[in-house]
Image (tube, rainbow, N blue to C red):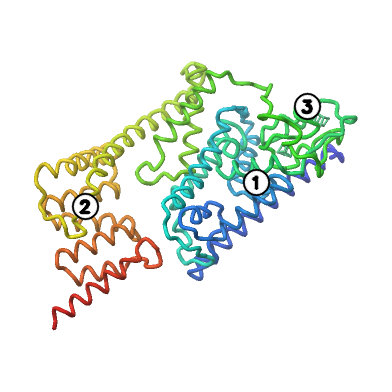
Amino acid sequence: MSKITNRQARPQRNSRRRALVLVLVQLALLAHIAHWLLTGSSIAPLEPSEAISFARSKVVTPGLIVLCVAVLSTLFVGRFFCGWACHLLAVQDGCAWLLRRLKIRTRPLRSRVLRLVPILAFVWMFLVPLYSRISSGGSHTLTTEWVTSAFWKTFPGPVVSIITFLVAGCYVVYLLGNKAYCNYACPYGAILGASDSFSVGRIVVDDSKCNSCMVCTQVCSSNVIVHQEIKEFGAVVDSNCMKTLDCVANCPTQALSFQLSKPAIMRRAGPPPVSTLHPLTWSEELVLALGFCFGFFATHDLFGAVPFLLALGFGLVSAHGALQFKRKKVSWAQSKINFVAVVFASSFFLHAALVQSQALMRDYHFNQTFDLRMGYLRGEVSLPLKPESMQAFLDAAFFASTTEWISYAGQERNAYVHGWTHLMSGDSEGFEREMYEVLDRRPDFGEVMFQLGIHYWVSGKEPQAIEILQKIDHSDPKYLTAQEYIEKINSHALEHQH
Ligand code: SF4
Ligand code: SF4
């Protein structure tokens, strides 16, 4: 048996320590979920994505606090939060470890264009809703939600969650290298990466000890070109450095250390240095960008089920496939497994794009009917509509049917469109049937309950109206008027009795 030397022991100790911290953090999160399952309510999720409630409706949640703490700590010591606490990073590291054990080599993709994706994702996820809330001039008051019984309301179901971890945490790592999701998709990575540029916590080099052996670059699971950066800047300046400290622990001459030092922003002017390792040409970058956009838009909200973060993962898979085609690497003769995988993935994306195009047409026509629908709910439109007014409903229903047909699955949005088309053509029962189908799939869908309640009231079915309106979550500011309607219906009924 070979003896473990002191130098071999250090890196192992560091990896084990980080793995242990990651496991403990994940266990704490599982304990949190278990507490909610056992007691029916718990502290609201600590997931940074919950900060979206603040952007949309000025609600302060524990998730917002976690995001703020992560940003502030990163501003000071760098991205330790990413490297030592994130669950998606833990899955990526676990997958990379498994691939190494299986002796499957992955080569990191070093794209300049894909690095823009996290920034755009952050803008789309947080800044756009924040801007639209502020610019709409809505009368949102600052509220808090520390404890919740609806713990899972903003998260996808178990199947989609597992697919998200498999695609973003495993498949993307297999295709694009470890931490590819962090570097090329994660919206939190954008804000944490930007904060890292100002941080004084840095991996710095002692030039007199460095012999340019490149071990630091080889061990970096964040694909940072460590040896190049320390040579040029005296420290790691790449904002993708997640302070795993693997380079520090593995450096054979102990030339690297983590210290408080000049921030990256003061060490380099302009964008991060372009990698000299496996650089991509601009035409390859363009193909990656197009492939990403295709995969993302083809899958985002597909079947009303693919969440934003998973669609970003699909975008990366599609980008990789596009690059494979460009490099003419898709051939049965070269690799049968690769060929089958690419054909399967291409079929999936093409089918998804077809479904999305039909859904887009459905929504386009259905949006034209907004005034008529609202007019009906205000009691200003009498039914059935004249044929010329029905046209947009019929077009929307046609595309709802084709969407359903080619996706081999019912969707709540399709049932919703069919329901309104029934109603406007005078089939009130058809409307109620389709709306209940929507509620079967999404029992807490306030908008549908609200519209169904008003429809019952307009049709003189007051008990049913009250029953459905009472089921709405009245704490949701969007449906405050539901309570007013209940009171209105009750007083109307009393007047009739007198
Ligand atoms: S591993 Fe250490 S000695 Fe080798 S290039 Fe990196 S810093 Fe220099
Ligand atoms: S540069 Fe060093 S500390 Fe930063 S991610 Fe890479 S190995 Fe970890």
Kindly identify which residue carries mark 3: 232
- In primary-sequence order, the first of circles 1 and 2 is 1
Q: How far apart are marks 1 and 3 (CA)?
A: 25 Å
| Local SS, label 1 | helix
- Indicate left or right for 292 with 419 as reference: right
Q: What residue type is labelled 2?
A: Arg
Residue 382, position as x, y percentages in the image? 11, 55
| Local SS, label 3 | helix
- Indicate left or right for 95 with 238 as reference: left
Instruction: Compare residues 73 and 320 and report the one nearer the observer.
Output: 73
Q: How crowded is mark 3: few (under 14 residues within 10 Å), some or many (20 or more)?
A: some
Q: Using the image, determine if residue 242 lies above or below residue 223.
A: below
Tell which tag, 1 or 2, sits nearer the viewer: 2
Q: How far apart are marks 1 and 2 (CA)?
A: 47 Å
Q: Which mark is residue 82?
A: 1
Q: Using the image, determine if residue 406 lies above or below residue 58.
A: above
- Name of the residue lying farthest toward the right: 208
Identify the image quadrant of the N terminus: top right
In which image quadrant can residue 361 be found?
A: top left
Kindly identify which residue carries mark 2: 373
- In primary-sequence order, the first of circles 3 and 2 is 3
Q: How crowded is mark 1: few (under 14 residues within 10 Å), some or many (20 or more)?
A: many
- In primary-sequence order, the first of circles 1 and 3 is 1
Q: Which amino acid does label 1 sit on?
A: Cys
Residue 108, position as x, y percentages in the image? 62, 29
Q: Which amino acid does label 3 sit on?
A: Glu
**Ligand 1: which quarter?**
top right
Q: Distance between the residues labelled 3 and 2?
A: 63 Å
Q: Using the image, determine if residue 288 lies above or below residue 44.
A: above
**Residue found at x 14% / y 44%:** 390
| Local SS, label 2 | helix
**Residue found at x 31% / y 34%:** 357
